[in-house]
Structure formats: C-alpha cells, structure tokens
Image (cartoon, grey):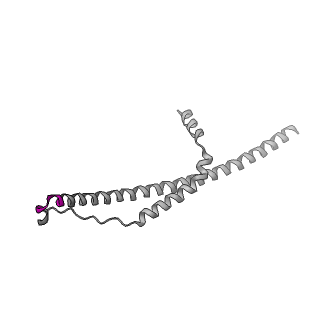
Amino acid sequence: MALGWLMVLQSVPWSDVIANAPKLADGAKKLWNTVAGKPALPKQPVPQTQPAASSDNPALAALDARAAALETAVSDLHGQMTASSELIKSLAEQNAQLVKRIEANRVRMLWLTAATAVLAIAVIAAWLR
C-alpha cells in the first residue's frame, strides 16, 4: 500500500509544481478579482399572473417567460462561477503555502545532510586515531 503512494509521489514533477505555484496563485487571484468585481444580475421574480397584453399575443407571453427563465439561469450561473472562483483562489493559496513549506523542508534536509556528513567524518576521524 505504501509502495503505491511512494511510486505516485515519485512520478510527480515536483520541480515543475514548485516553479509554477506562484503563477497559479497569481492566476487564481486575477480570476477571483475579475469574477468578484462583476455585479450579479438582480433576480427578477417571475410574474405569477400573466399581463393583459400576453393573453392577446401568446408568442409574446412565451418570450417573456423564456427571458425570465434565462435571467434566472444566468443569475444562478453567476453565483456558481463566483463560488468556483473563490474555491480556486483558496486552493491556489493553499498550494502556494504548501510549496513554501516543501522548499523550507528541502533546505532543512540539505543542512541536516551536511551536518550528518560532517559529524560522520568527525566520528570516523576520531575512531581512526
């Protein structure tokens, strides 16, 4: 089970992920700013009663009903787009934080490797004396 996860983690191009994290975060922020800046269309309630002119012309009534349904659908889609872009922004920020932590861990590992190598050389030198 752990071997499968290890293979998956080794197959990820981490250098590309780390290099592209800032671009991803910037793109998500731009998307959020674009979507959040657009005002949502005000919801207009669909009239329950038909106007008097609609009874004279059924085609006009059908077009009014269709326009009202389309306005509602557009408003719903705008809400979904806003929620999706907020999620993307949040995920991009989390990804950027993760990349920073990975980079910090990589630097720590280099320091620990160097310290271990120096300590190993000192132990071997002391043992050979």
Image-based side of 122 in relation to 97, left or right: right
**What is the magenta range?**
55-61
Relative vertical location of residue 128 with respect to residue 24 in this rendering, above or below: above
Coordinates of residue 23 in the picture (x, y in percent): 56, 56
- The residue lying at 56 percent from left, 52 percent from top is 98
Q: Main secondary structure of the magenta part?
A: helix
Q: Is residue 12 magenta?
A: no
- In the picture, the quarter occupied by the C terminus is top right
- The residue lying at 28 percent from left, 60 percent from top is 71
Corner quadrant of residue 116: top right
Image-based side of 7 in relation to 82, left or right: right
- The residue lying at 46 percent from left, 55 percent from top is 88
Coordinates of residue 122 in the picture (x, y in percent): 82, 44
Coordinates of residue 31 in the picture (x, y in percent): 47, 60
Judge by depth and name the residue closer to the eye, 117 or 54.
Answer: 54
How many dots with numbers? 0
Image-based side of 93 in relation to 75, left or right: right
Judge by depth and name the residue closer to the eye, 31 or 9.
Answer: 31
Relative vertical location of residue 7 with respect to residue 21 in this rendering, above or below: above
Relative vertical location of residue 3 with respect to residue 24 in this rendering, above or below: above
Corner quadrant of residue 67: bottom left
Image-based side of 60 in relation to 42, left or right: left
Coordinates of residue 26 in the picture (x, y in percent): 54, 59
